[in-house]
């Protein structure tokens, strides 16, 4: 198969993670996943931006995309998309945890981590579920995520969905 086909296929494979990651900010307030608790360093575990309501929306939207994708692949894509969405959000929460440990407040910018944490989480479960991803598909998705994250966050800022343009 051609490399263009492989790259387009990688977009379909990672689409649930992208949708899940992009849907959380639509929830402005909710119950924080960390329940407001602090880590041993005295800083919040994740912060107010990681909520149960945002997680539910992310899982719902990401899995819904998977249901649609399963029409082109196999029925197991519904399960894969759910797990991919979940692991994308776990990756995002790990990113928030790291930022809190570094003393970076909610909305603070860490170039690279902000754009790729969800891709790394999604990639982990895709590998564990033996979804065939090549190194160049992974690198393509990382590059795509980096640039899309920048652009979509700026648009969300202009639409007043986000408080900062990154």
Image: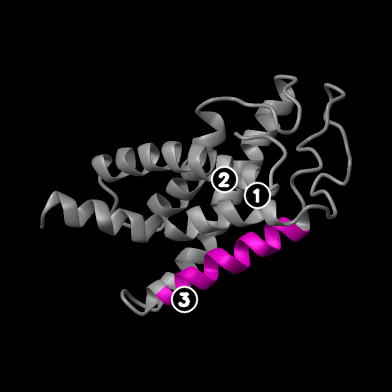
**Residue sitting at 69 percent across and 56 percent down?**
26
Mark 2 near mark 1, Cβ–Cβ under 8 Å?
Answer: yes
- Dot 2 surroundings within 10 Å: few (below 14), some, or many (20 or more)? some
Residue 23: x %, y % from top left: 61, 57
Q: Is residue 156 above or below residue 14?
A: above
Q: Is residue 60 magenta?
A: yes
- Left or right of 72, for residue 31: right
**Residue sitting at 36 percent across and 80 percent down?**
71
- Residue indicated by mark 1: 159
- Colour treatment of the image: one colour
**Residue sitting at 49 percent across and 53 percent down?**
18
Farthest-out residue, front: 158
Marks 2 and 3, how far apart in space?
27 Å
Query: Relative to the observer, which residue lies in front, 99 or 133?
Result: 99
- Residue indicated by mark 2: 155
Q: Earlier in the sequence, mark 2 or mark 3?
A: 3
Q: Is residue 155 above or below residue 99?
A: below
Q: The residue tagged with tag 2: helix, strand or loop?
A: helix
Q: Earlier in the sequence, mark 1 or mark 3?
A: 3
Q: The residue tagged with tag 1: helix, strand or loop?
A: loop
**Residue sitting at 28 percent across and 45 percent down?**
137
The part of the image, by quadrant, that contains residue 38 is top right
The part of the image, by quadrant, that contains residue 86 is bottom right
Residue 159: x %, y % from top left: 65, 49
């Amino acid at each position: 198969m051609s490399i263009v086909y492989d790259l387009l296929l990688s977009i379909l494979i990672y689409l649930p993670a992208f949708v899940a990651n992009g849907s959380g900010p639509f929830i402005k307030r909710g119950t924080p996943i960390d329940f407001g608790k602090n880590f041993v360093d005295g800083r919040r575990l994740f912060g107010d931006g990681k909520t149960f309501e945002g997680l539910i929306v992310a899982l719902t939207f990401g899995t819904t995309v998977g249901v649609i994708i399963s029409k082109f692949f196999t029925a197991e894509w519904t399960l894969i998309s759910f797990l991919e969405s979940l692991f994308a959000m776990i990756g995002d929460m790990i990113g928030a945890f790291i930022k809190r440990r570094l003393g970076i407040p909610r909305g603070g910018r860490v170039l690279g981590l902000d754009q790729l944490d969800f891709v790394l989480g999604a990639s982990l479960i895709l590998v564990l579920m033996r979804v065939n991803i090549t190194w160049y598909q992974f690198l393509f998705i990382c590059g795509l995520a980096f640039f899309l994250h920048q652009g979509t966050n700026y648009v969300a800022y202009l639409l007043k969905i986000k408080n900062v343009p990154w």
